Image (cartoon, helix red, strand yellow):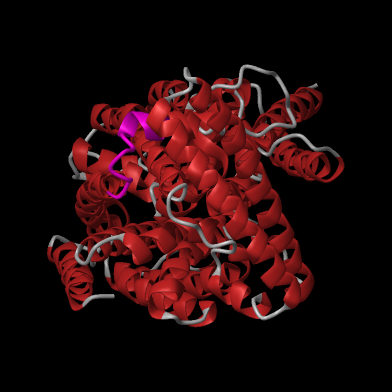
Amino acid sequence: MHWLDWLIVAAYLVYIVYDGLRLTKRSNEVEGYFLAHRSLPWWAVGLSVMATQLSAITLVGTTGQAYADGMRFIQFYFGLPFAMVILCMTVVPFFYRAKVYTAYEYLEGRFDAKTRALTSFFFLVSRGMSCGVIVAAPSVILSIVLGWNELTTIMVMGLSTTIYTMFGGVQAVTWTDVKQMIIIFVGLFVILIVIVGQFPASVSLGDAVSLAGLTGRLKTVDPSFNPNETYTLWSGLIGGMFLAMSYFGCDQSQVQRFLTARSVSEGRTSLLMSAFVKIPMQVLILFIGVMVFVFYQFQQPPMIFKSDDRAKVEQSAEYQKLNAEYSEAFDSRQRAALAFAGTGSQSEIGAAAREIYIASNEKMNGIRKRAGDLVSSTTGNKFNDVNYVFPTFVTTYAPAGVIGLIIAAIFAAAMSSISAELTALSTATVIDFYRRHFRREATDAHYLMVSKLATGVWGIVACIVALYAGRLGSLIEVVNKFGSFFYGSLLGVFMLAIGTKRATGNGAFFGLIAGIISVAIVSKYSSISFLWYNLVGCVVVVVVGMLISLVQKK
């Protein structure tokens, strides 16, 4: 990178850490460290809710997802507004008025200690794995920019953020999130301008949109009801709604955010802000990924974006042959794209160019798949380079200064999200287990010391998970798959707690176990999309929990 880029990254990160710690007040008390004494304004909480979810995964994984698959991913969020409205009417007032530190603390008062412990345990497992994926995302960037291997980059990013989080409280995390959102929005618009500005002079934004439409990348709604397909209208509205209710209503990393608000109404407003700003922001991020795809119609993209995988096979005769075929197919696609953009689909030349373009694009996709298979057979690992598309573009084609801005935005997103997750993991560990079962009476200083140690342990766990997460596919899908194994079942427990007085502790406890087992069975023996796991887990927990409760009472 240019020295100007390094200066921007260094200046931003130094400022964000300094400003976050400067705004931390009374973090030497348990309530101040974990909940900021419930004193934060709704707009800061709302931005923090968005920032916690908007990690580097969103910037890296979602743009790569759009490059490979188009805008269909937006259907994932169609159920979000409905989920937020439901949560505002139910869990926000329940948790806030219960004066709890964690969502699971409420369950002991409603049910019993074992139900609280089991739900908190499953949260720790799911969020610990997801945090590892969040650490893996910025490591993708660092490995490209600095030329480091993934182990080094994961340890640098994960451990440095862990150390920062150990000394900051939830106020530091929240105010860092606010700054992060500002720089991310600025960075997104700047990079979109850079991409469009590098199109050939004869290609307008309208031409770019038309080219993207030829490959189906602008398709945003799939009305078919196919449970095996991940991104459809119905999976988003139903499965996505249950996932959003589970994540924002049962995940401590999100519950802890609205518990820091000044009142119930401000907590509700913070969630509604996220509900109606998130989808437009996600559309912008996906559109950037699609525009990166259009840019690579006129500049030959790497056949393999992941440089270390490419280095392992590029000297082989098979790779050289594939690369020659790939270049030939690209030349054909480039000529057809320019002809189509210059004449449009209405003319005979444009119609012919359209057919050549589609055929050449499919040929390039087929060659890329063969190259991926070659990497898999050589390395013995599953090949997926979708997470490397956006960082490769930024570091290769963005001008000096812009690279630093985008890298700073990604780093800041990662560090803020990692710190938020580690804070939630530490809170649940200390409040739900250590203080509840091991040391019920101690000073705030003692609990804060244990919290910082717990943060360090979870940071190490996240780094270990991150070593494997990058090989699992699109990071934005991986993190949601991890959550979907647990979230629906956790939601079912809270539905039993809040929705009916007949449910008992045993019903909720064994219903939760049944829900987790049912999701495991469905994931292993069926091909339905992971979004439906949330509905399956929730329904099984409620049905089994109510049956056990009714039998127990009789």
Q: Quadrant of residue 326?
A: bottom right
Residue at position x 60%, y 43% from top? Answer: 361
Residue 315 percent across, percent down from the top left: 66, 81
Residue at position x 18%, y 69% from top? Answer: 8
Whether residue 213 sits left or right of residue 489 in the image: it is left
Residue 157 percent across, percent down from the top left: 40, 73
Q: Is residue 153 above or below residue 297?
A: below
Total labels drawn: 0
Residue 160 percent across, percent down from the top left: 36, 77
Specify the segment rendered in magenta.
Answer: 198-209
Taking depth in this image into account, of 78 and 73 the one nearest to the observer is: 73
Question: Which residue is at the far right?
Answer: 525
Taking depth in this image into account, of 100 and 280 the one nearest to the observer is: 280
Quadrant of the image for the C terminus?
Answer: top right
Instruction: Confirm whether the magenta stretch covers residue 203.
Output: yes
Question: Which residue is at the far front?
Answer: 349
Q: Is residue 296 above or below residue 71?
A: below
Whether residue 137 sits left or right of residue 275 in the image: it is right
Taking depth in this image into account, of 388 and 426 the one nearest to the observer is: 388
Residue 184 percent across, percent down from the top left: 26, 50
Whether residue 239 sits left or right of residue 213 in the image: it is right
Taking depth in this image into account, of 130 and 280 the one nearest to the observer is: 280
Residue at position x 40%, y 59% from top? Answer: 393
* Residue 250 appears in view: no
Q: Is residue 464 above or below residue 137?
A: below
Quadrant of the image for the N terminus?
Answer: bottom left
Residue at position x 52%, y 37% from top? Answer: 70
Instruction: Confirm whether the magenta stretch covers residue 102.
Output: no
* Residue 355 appears in view: yes
Whether residue 323 sits left or right of residue 12 in the image: it is right
